[in-house]
Image (cartoon, rainbow, N blue to C red):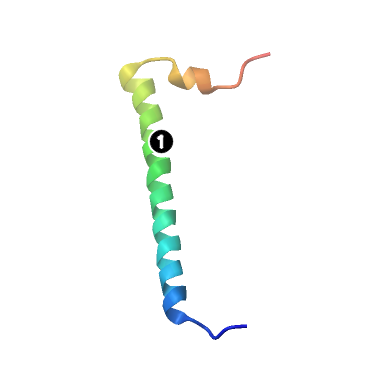
Amino acid sequence: MTAQNFELAKSIKEIHETAGEVGYYVIGLHAAAALFHHYVLADNTVSRMRLPKY
């Protein structure tokens, strides 16, 4: 085993938090784009994402 490396732990924590934040922004942007397509462009993008009716 090696000694604890607090600087490395801090760097990894910062990277982890930043990646999580970026992920939330990407999810929000994706949802906003879907709403834009549905309400502004009024195309069938959202309809095509639905499961087919059987």
Residue 50 percent coordinates (x, y): 55, 22
The residue sitting at 41% across, 62% down in the picture is 15
Say what amino acid the circle numbered 1 marks.
His
The residue sitting at 62% across, 16% down in the picture is 52
- Identify which residue, 17 or 38, lies in the foreground: 17
Q: Name the residue under label 1.
A: 30
The residue sitting at 48% across, 81% down in the picture is 5
Residue 9 percent coordinates (x, y): 47, 74
Find residue 3 and report its image quarter. bottom right
Q: How crowded is mark 1: few (under 14 residues within 10 Å), some or many (20 or more)?
A: few
Residue at the outermost front position: 2
Find residue 10 and report its image quarter. bottom left
Residue at the outermost right position: 54
Residue at the outermost left position: 40
Q: What element carries label 1?
A: helix
Residue 22 percent coordinates (x, y): 39, 50
The residue sitting at 36% across, 22% down in the picture is 37
Q: In this view, does 24 lie above or below 33?
A: below
Could you tell me how many numbered marks the image carries? Answer: 1
Left or right: 41 with respect to 11? left
Looking at the figure, which quarter contains the N terminus?
bottom right
Residue 54 percent coordinates (x, y): 68, 13
- Identify which residue, 26 or 41, lies in the foreground: 26
